[in-house]
Image: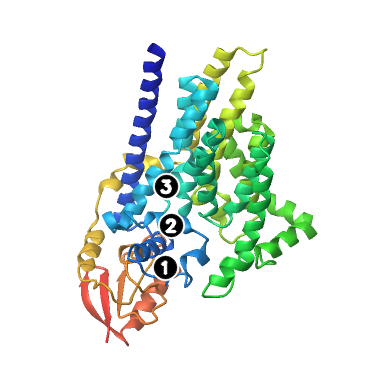
Amino acid sequence: MKQYIRKNIASISVIFIILVTGIIYSYISVTSHIHFQTFGWDLGYFDQLIWKISKGVYPYSTLSEVNILAGHFAPILFLFAPLYWIWSDPRMLLISQAFLVVFAAYPLYIICRDKIKNFPFCLAVVFSYLFFIGTQWTILNEFHEVAVVPLLLSLLFYALEKEKKLLLWICIIGLLFTKEELALLVAAIGLTIYFHFKKKEGIYLFIFSFIFFFFLTNFFMPFISEKGTYYHPHLSSSAKTPSEFTLKLISDPSFALTSMVNPPEKIQTLLSSLLSFSLLPFFAPISILIPVVEQFLMRFLYTGPQITVWQNINHHAAPVSILLPLASIYATKRLVDKKNLNRARLLAFLTIVLFISSIIQDIYFKAPVHSIFKKQLYETLPWMYDNFEVLKFVPQNVAFATQNSLFPHVSQRNEIYLLPEIKNAKYIFVDLHDGPNKFSPLSYEEMKIFIDKLSKDYSVVYKKGDAILFKKD
């Protein structure tokens, strides 16, 4: 009876920590949006698509100029649409994303509890996941469909441990329907299922997922795309499709080796990721590490220009954010089962080291969660109030163009464009108060020149400070 009560108290404690963390991340994320620190890419892009789905409108993005399944193969986004029936606002996406990511910690805790049976260590694992720099940036860098990946992966491993086949296949389908490149991650998980969990279905899953990836990128996505091609041809300057890129890797091994280590920041990302979990994943069974290896290969073989792909400061780190603490659990199980080691002392040591590693990486990388202690988070500046005032005069259901920082505040409409693109926009909204990334792809100076030229075809409807609403003459 005492053990049952202790077990429940431990679970409630973990759930409480998860809820508090989710609230903190939600608050930071929503406040950043209110302060105009979210952008057309990516929050505005997803907001327009999910708003259209919620209204039963064809989910075509006027930002990417392709539909929701051709930009990335992301049917999972349809599940977010009902949230807009409750509150049709991009903040709904930010809040749901925060809680989806942090709740992945609970299946992680259950796996650890059942395998290690040591609450302090399991709490350290949960802590290391919740405050890993990759986890934080998955939540606090806009909104992305891969926010569901940590929860799906933790539930997938829980299902494997508990032999819950229905849950397992729900998670597999969920991953395949989240983003086309995740089919390769599922293929890697298939090998883990075969080699570690000794299930022959793993081989079938590996073969199917591998073929499914190339089917999507070579045939299905180009076929349904308004542009008639795969939308992400930037894998390499020498390859326009995943198939061409694969052939390049096979025919030129030196290219693959060079891509893996250049720039050196890629190796730094690998080392910092492992050190954040006290190098514990290094001791996990190879069969468990296959998905981890696949993820780092996917990110490091990429040659640019989007350098954040191989960093831990955005959603690209979402899968490893949960795979690394999972590997830490299996590594610890492997270590504590050795007869020549003192189990209690080893777990006490690993618990302390894991907590310290997590705290150090938070301090070293100046983790975004620290903003909760900064007064700037709680300040609404005059230029922000100017934007709020002008937003009141923005009409609905008209073709619209605006800058990067204002885009997600007006993106729930059929036609919206990112300046300098205007097309058939009847209204244009700009905020000339300078700031990071506000005018991308234009610079501040380029935006001022652009606005000067608007006077030929547009007149000012309303102006408040540096916030200006134009209407086509």
The residues tagged by marks 3 and 1 sit, at their Cα atoms, a distance apart of 24 Å
Q: Residue at x 22, y 72 (%)?
A: 463
Can you give x and y, in whole percent of width and height, for residue 369 in the image? 39, 41
Neighbourhood count class around disc 2 (C-alpha, 10 Å): few under 14, some 14–19, many 20 upward: many
What's under tag 3, amino acid-wise? Ile
Residue on which the image places disc 3: 139
Q: Name the residue nearer the viewer: 224 or 389.
A: 224
Q: Quadrant of residue 462?
A: bottom left
Contact flag, marks 2 and 1 (Cβ < 8 Å): yes
Q: Residue at x 34, y 62 (%)?
A: 54
Q: Is residue 410 left or right of residue 125?
A: left
Q: Which mark is residue 77?
A: 2
The type of colouring in the image is rainbow
Q: Does 424 appear above or below 302?
A: below
For marks 2 and 1 on the same chain, the one whose residue lies earlier in the sequence: 1
What's under tag 2, amino acid-wise? Leu
For marks 3 and 1 on the same chain, the one whose residue lies earlier in the sequence: 1
Q: Which mark is residue 59?
A: 1
Can you give x and y, in whole percent of width and height, for residue 103 in the image? 41, 38
For the residue labelled by badge 2, is the local secondary structure a helix, a strand or a loop? helix
Residue 33: in sight, yes or no? Answer: no
What's under tag 1, amino acid-wise? Pro
Can you give x and y, in whole percent of width and height, for residue 308 in the image? 54, 54
Can you give x and y, in whole percent of width and height, for residue 349 in the image? 54, 19
The residues tagged by marks 3 and 2 sit, at their Cα atoms, a distance apart of 16 Å
Q: Is residue 44 left or right of residue 204?
A: left
Q: Is residue 366 left or right of residue 84?
A: right
Residue 305: in sight, yes or no? Answer: yes
Mark in the foreground, 3 or 2: 2
